[in-house]
Image (tube, helix red, strand yellow):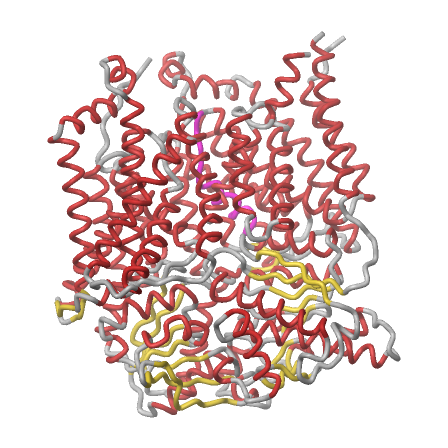
Amino acid sequence: MKRIDPTLMALILPLAMLLAAGPFLPQWVLFLVTLSIGKGFVVLGLMLLLRTGLVSFGQGLFYCLGAYAAGGMGTAFDVSDVFLLLVSGAAAAALLAFVLGFLVAKYRDIFFAMLSMAFSMILYGLLVKTAALGSSDGFNVPVPTLFEAKLAEASTRYMVFAVACVATFFVALAVHWYQKSPLGSLSPAIKDNELRVEYMGASVRHAIHVKFVIAAALAGLGGALTGMTVGHIDPEMAYWTTSGEFVFVTILSGTGSVVAPFLGSLIFELIRSYAYEYSPNTWQMVLGTSMLIVIVFLPAGMWSVFASRRKRA
Amino acid sequence: MVELLSTVVDGIIYSSWLFVVAVGLTLIYGVMKILNIAHGSLYALGAYSAASLGGFWLGHGYPPLGSYGMLALSAVLVGLVMGPLIERGLLRFMYGKDEIVLLLATYSVFLILEDAIKLIWGVDSLSIAEPYGLLGSVDFAGLTYPVYSFILLAVSAVTGIGLAWVLQRTRQGKLLIAVIHDSEMSAVMGIRVPRFYLITFTVGAMLAAVGGAFTAPMVSVVPGMGVEVIVLAFAVVVIGGLGSLKGAALGALMVGLVRSASVHFLPQVELFSIYLVMVLVLLFRPKGLFSSAEARKI
Amino acid sequence: MQKRFGFGRILFVAFATVLIAVGFAISAPAVEQKPIKIGIVSFLSGPAAGPFGVPARNGAEILAEALNEGGKVPGYGTKGLGGAPIELVYLDEAGGTTKQVTEYRNLVQRQNVDLVIGYISSGDTLAIAPVAEELKKLTVFFDSGTPRIFEDASYKYVFRTGSHSTMDSVGAALYVTEMRPNIRKYAGINQNYAWGQDSWSDFEAAMKILAPKAKAVTSQMTKLMSGQFGAEISVLLSSGAEVIHSSFWGGDTESFVLQAAPRGLFKKSTVVLTCGEHIMYRLGNKIPDGTVLGGKGTVGIFAPDTELNRWFQKVYAERYYVPPTYPTYRMAQAILGVKSAYEKAMAANKGMTPTQDQVIASFEHLSFDTPSGKVEMGLGKGHQAVTGISYGTTKVVNGKLTITNIKTYPKEKVNPPEGVLSKDWIESGFKRTK
């Protein structure tokens, strides 16, 4: 019998359960899960880069661009179909990444991080300067529809949630397969030793360019999803602290599996939201401490809890 | 012509502030390969301590000129307390891990310190304005500048030259350079590397606090003042080349002059002028202005 | 073997998912509680906490306590809200709109508050308004500047009990042109984000009408909380501007005054700080003579001498050792507005607990007494408050800061009429009729 890919199952089961439980869950849970999925996409892209040894401190650039592309489509062209908006967010981000990739792909380490941050801060500056887009206040995004059919408010939330779950399934699986493909499996090798990879005849720069575009598309997708879930977008999405939070969640999640980013961002959102609720004056301290605990005790991220279980079994 | 002159003066004053704020970051990175995000909090701690100590001094009617000593003293205190606390208490357990993990550890410290500052000093702004106006002002290029701006220039010059002297002319400095180049080999040669790490981090923390303490008289000391400084300091240090003292000086000068020019002639681009400089420099010098070539290891 | 390992892990993930979902469901208690639970959202951390967030929070606390005791607040005799005690839940506004929308939803659906009062940042209010509408929860913005909320859209569940920012700029332009009728040159220094940009463009537009011959010589836009204004001050000094407009707030205002005063900027030009009132007690006599201060309303030192205001100033100063400033006054406007609406709806409902829709109906077009005078819900189909505004000039007398030459502009003079966009109203030359 052919072995079922455990990652496939690890995606199907929880997502199917969430889909089934969705209509019965309180609204704020749907919201939190949808938001976590949106951020999870961005983190998934960062994980892909991290496996190659690259850390982007400017993923907010693509996250923000994706959100503005989707928001712009909705406001300017009256497009409200959820799929079209998601695709336009991802496409806009991928396009920009394709262009920037020619520059960025030769940078490594902290310089890759800082260059990407500089680009995202330039976008931030441009948006703050653009009064037509609401400057730093941003603008509200129209309620998404399914194939241009407007649903009742309560079912809209579930619809976006369901679309997010389904998208997670396909996207995560695609990334999973990509990682196993010849180009994808270069990642750890590049991280380990670039020169060896070059001597083997593979182009490191090309491989990194491709990953950069994929990561950007994922961030754009995440941005579009977040924008329509929150209902409002603003330049803060491109600010360096936003990007920093994504990097944090990536490390928190670990690079063990494509499921990790989604689980990681859900846990992060939960910690943050309860810290806000129970210690409104010291939530940063709570967040910082829980972060240190993870770094010290789970150096390979939270996914290592599952991974180590697997080894023992 | 006058406008040009004042552009340069404004630019240099701002550059000297930038240099003081950024130099500790480049020192720590150069030696320990840690991009210290808590740098911003240490800066804020320096400012808060300066406001408290300076306020105490002036409140007791001691000679006002002594308040400059209080600024320096508070920076030293912050460095001596926080440096060893963070390095011995946390970072030393993480050496050898990924740079990014160390960076996130300092980010956690930053978050914790932000709230700690709030718990100690509250959310209201503090101010210690007396040292700013104490020495009067001078007229220059048709404009009035407070003498304090030139004190800042002196502080930055003393810091820069002092560090360069220690690194290049003293025995300890030369040993430190050995540690920077190859810490494993240095350890083999009998250099006590952990001690150098502790000293470096303490000095770096102290420099961050110096930046904060000497900024305190010209601003209102408020929560969150460290956040803005982090990115500025990062940009300066990356432009100059991480770990390079000369680079930090040149980076600060470039950013300072460009910012001043944009304020004077093109206020619209001020918001992202620093990032434009960063992108341009990195495009032509991918590792910053001053960076040593790395050996390619196969 | 391989397969079993896989399934072990899958089971673990599935189990964790279920646990999380169950945890969510349990942690949302749906029990009806007797006190009226109000979520208070304001900045508790970051640079806006000291000048705005905490004074507002404190104002809410002091008012809720006094109201719950009953008979303490002049003019508001009943206990709590129509007899029901008020319970406050505090939330930090820091973190940006995505987090605020998340926390707003949690506040409404997880903590089950009866209504929400809050939000200082314009971006946050723009983002929260449609969510309040979706969740059908009465939400009262106590501050926030942007006129866009009710000019771009209309809402049923959203109210704002403070005037929007157009008033600040128009009032400043009126005051300045009355003070210097022959003004030729003016300049601005504002923070480079929506608040600063809007304040400046409204001011510039109003100046074009009120002093057509005057010219804007430079508009400096500084990074929010940058704290370093050396180059900007040089430009302002050499610009020759007679008047300098600034909507700086909090730490930026203080830093600007500290850096500009020794360089003689306040001697060379009249500096107008449109929200200078909230830092006047912090800076005191460090503010040079002749500076024009505004307070975004008739608040604090500009507030009317009523019994309610005297009581408010006294209890606040007794507990917090400083006089209340504009954010505290605005919070009082929100809480007393809610109380008035609630009790009016209760009276209409024959003394029974009113429904949310009844409270909303009585809130619209309501007019109520506050420490800052009468507030009227006159715009945005009865959802947006209008008040007058005062400006004054500083003068240090015997080492103490005083305000002289106070001018108060009535609400019709500084706010657009219903249905006209603020921007169009200014450009039309402040026409009252369409």
- Compared to residue C422, the image places residue C304 above or below, namely below
Q: Residue at x 16, y 48 (%)?
A: B157
Judge whether residue A66 is colored magenta. yes
Q: Is residue C63 above or below residue A222?
A: below
Q: Nearer the viewer, residue C236 or A89?
A: C236
Image quarter in which the N terminus of chain C is found: top right
Using the image as rendered, state which of residue A87 and residue A189 is in the foreground.
A189
Q: Position of residue C209 (x, y in %)?
A: 42, 86
Q: Position of residue A286 (x, y in %)?
A: 56, 42
Is B57 left, or right, of C321 in this rendering?
Answer: left
Position of the C terminus of chain C by quadrant:
bottom right
The magenta stretch spans which residues? A53-68
Per the image, is A182 magenta? no
In depth, the one of C331 and C419 nearer the eye is: C331
Residue C17 in view here: yes
Q: Is residue B153 above or below residue A196?
A: below
Counting from the top left corner in percent of width and height, residue B71 is at 26, 54
Residue at the image position 68 percent from the left and 62 percent from the top: C88
The x and y percentages for residue C28 are 77, 48
Where B135 falls versus B199 (above or below)? below
Classify residue B103 by image quadrant.
top left
Total marks placed:
0
Q: Residue furthest left?
A: B169
**Residue at left offset 42%, top offset 55%:** A126
Q: Quadrant of residue A253?
A: top right
Does residue A212 appear to the left or right of B68 in the view shown? right
Left or right side of B108 for C59: right
- In the image, B151 versus A261, the foreground residue is B151
Can residue B264 be seen in this snapshot?
no
